[in-house]
Image: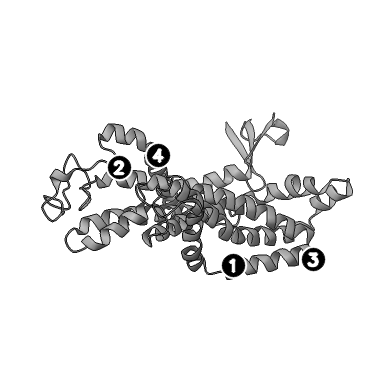
């Protein structure tokens, strides 16, 4: 007894019931149709990509570690602001080898301040991921809304939005931050006032949202320009569907793949930007832990304590690299013409 299998369309497999040898088509009792959705096909392609799976596992580890920072602090027994002056010499340098690494302090202690570096990195990743994810979500929402409206309406609306996008992209981001952040902080806090821990992260999210939505808007606009003349859109208009229905019920479901890819590649760029601003002294301030400021604090100790610089720098590098590799793999998996 053999089993007949008939090739069907892409992603569709036809399975026939067992047939006796020599029996004709009339002996087939039933056919079972097994279909796969575009999401299932993308997941199958992603599972076959070793780089994507490894980078995805690394991302899951980093995000779980950052989300569970209070639990890690409780199990580790040390807080991000706790100091250990007894582990420093008279010059403020850590005692022992490799920056004071030991079973009690896995990555050593911070020079001069005596803080545990491992718990600083855990909370620093939490800060970076929180700012990047919130800013990326707001950026995607703004970009999708503006891009889908510009691409569908066209005409003067599209021209005005395109002009505004070009104007926004012409602003030098870091120069604007150097000018805007101190002015914004001075509007809420005096020279001797202590800023609230949430103020700088919220301010960075607003700045990132103002500047970063343009890339998403351009991508969505280009996709909508190619979709608005398709048959399903024409049918929706002919049936009397309103503007909101066409935009968000007809066009938006066909944009989820590029939007997801843009989001996965947007987060690492925002992590890098947040770390750069903190490194330059206009981002996250003390006492909130942050990877960029941790790297900045390590610069004066590159010669005496190179491990301090390497731990923060390597953590930031691995976090951004994992996001970029996973974003590339996700893009290939969502591409129906991908050969990977």
Q: Is residue 301 above or below residue 239?
A: below
The span from disc 3 to disc 1 (Cα, nearest Å) is 20 Å
**Which residue is at a point 74% across and 56% down the rendered structure image?**
149
Percent of width and height locating residue 29 = 69, 28
Q: Which residue lies under the disc numbered 2?
A: 80
Q: Is residue 25 above or below residue 252?
A: above
The span from disc 4 to disc 2 (Cα, nearest Å) is 18 Å
Q: Nearer the N terminus, badge 1 or badge 4? A: 4
* 163 or 84: nearer the viewer: 84
Q: Are marks 3 and 1 in contact (CB under 8 Å)?
A: no
In this rendering, the label closer to the viewer, 4 or 2 = 2
Percent of width and height locating residue 94 = 15, 51
In this rendering, the label closer to the viewer, 1 or 4 = 1
The span from disc 1 to disc 2 (Cα, nearest Å) is 38 Å
The span from disc 1 to disc 4 (Cα, nearest Å) is 34 Å
* Mark 3 Cα-neighbour bin, 10 Å: few <14, some 14–19, many ≥20: few
Q: Which residue lies under the disc numbered 4?
A: 64
Q: Is residue 5 above or below residue 188?
A: above
Q: Are marks 4 and 2 in contact (CB under 8 Å)?
A: no
The span from disc 2 to disc 3 (Cα, nearest Å) is 53 Å
Label ID, residue 169: 1
Q: Which residue lies under the disc numbered 3?
A: 156
Percent of width and height locating residue 15 = 63, 36
Residue 30 occupies quadrant: top right
* Mark 1 Cα-neighbour bin, 10 Å: few <14, some 14–19, many ≥20: some
**Which residue is at a point 35% across and 50% down the rendered structure image?**
286
């Amino acid at each position: 007894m053999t089993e007949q299998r008939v090739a069907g369309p892409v992603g569709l497999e036809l399975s026939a019931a067992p047939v006796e040898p020599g029996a004709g088509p009339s002996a087939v009792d039933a056919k079972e149709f097994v279909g796969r959705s575009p999401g299932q096909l993308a997941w199958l392609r992603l599972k076959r990509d070793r780089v994507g799976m490894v980078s995805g596992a690394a991302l899951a580890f980093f995000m779980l570690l950052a989300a569970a920072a209070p639990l890690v602090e409780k199990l580790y027994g040390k807080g991000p602001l706790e100091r250990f002056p007894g582990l420093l010499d008279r010059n403020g340098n850590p005692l022992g080898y490799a920056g004071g690494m030991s079973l009690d302090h896995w990555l050593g202690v911070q020079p001069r301040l005596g803080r545990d570096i491992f718990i600083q990195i855990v909370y620093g990743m939490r800060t970076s991921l929180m700012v990047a994810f919130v800013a990326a979500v707001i950026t995607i929402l703004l970009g999708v809304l503006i891009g889908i409206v510009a691409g569908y309406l066209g005409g003067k609306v599209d021209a005005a939005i395109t002009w505004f996008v070009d104007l926004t992209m012409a602003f030098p981001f870091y120069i604007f931050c150097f000018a805007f952040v101190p002015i914004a902080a001075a509007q809420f806090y005096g020279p001797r006032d202590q800023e609230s821990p949430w103020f700088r992260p919220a301010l960075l999210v607003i700045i990132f949202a103002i500047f970063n939505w343009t890339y998403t808007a351009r991508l969505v606009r280009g996709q909508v320009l190619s979709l608005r003349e398709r048959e399903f859109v024409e049918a929706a208009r002919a049936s009397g569907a309103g503007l909101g229905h066409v935009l968000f019920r007809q066009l938006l479901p066909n944009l989820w793949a590029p939007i997801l890819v843009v989001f996965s590649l947007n987060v690492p760029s925002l992590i890098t930007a947040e770390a750069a601003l903190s490194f330059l002294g206009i981002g996250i301030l003390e006492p909130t832990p942050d990877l960029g400021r941790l790297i900045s604090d390590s610069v004066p100790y590159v010669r005496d304590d190179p491990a301090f610089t390497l731990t923060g720098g390597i953590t930031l590098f691995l976090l951004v690299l994992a996001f970029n590799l996973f974003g590339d793999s996700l893009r290939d998996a969502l591409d129906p013409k991908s050969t990977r």
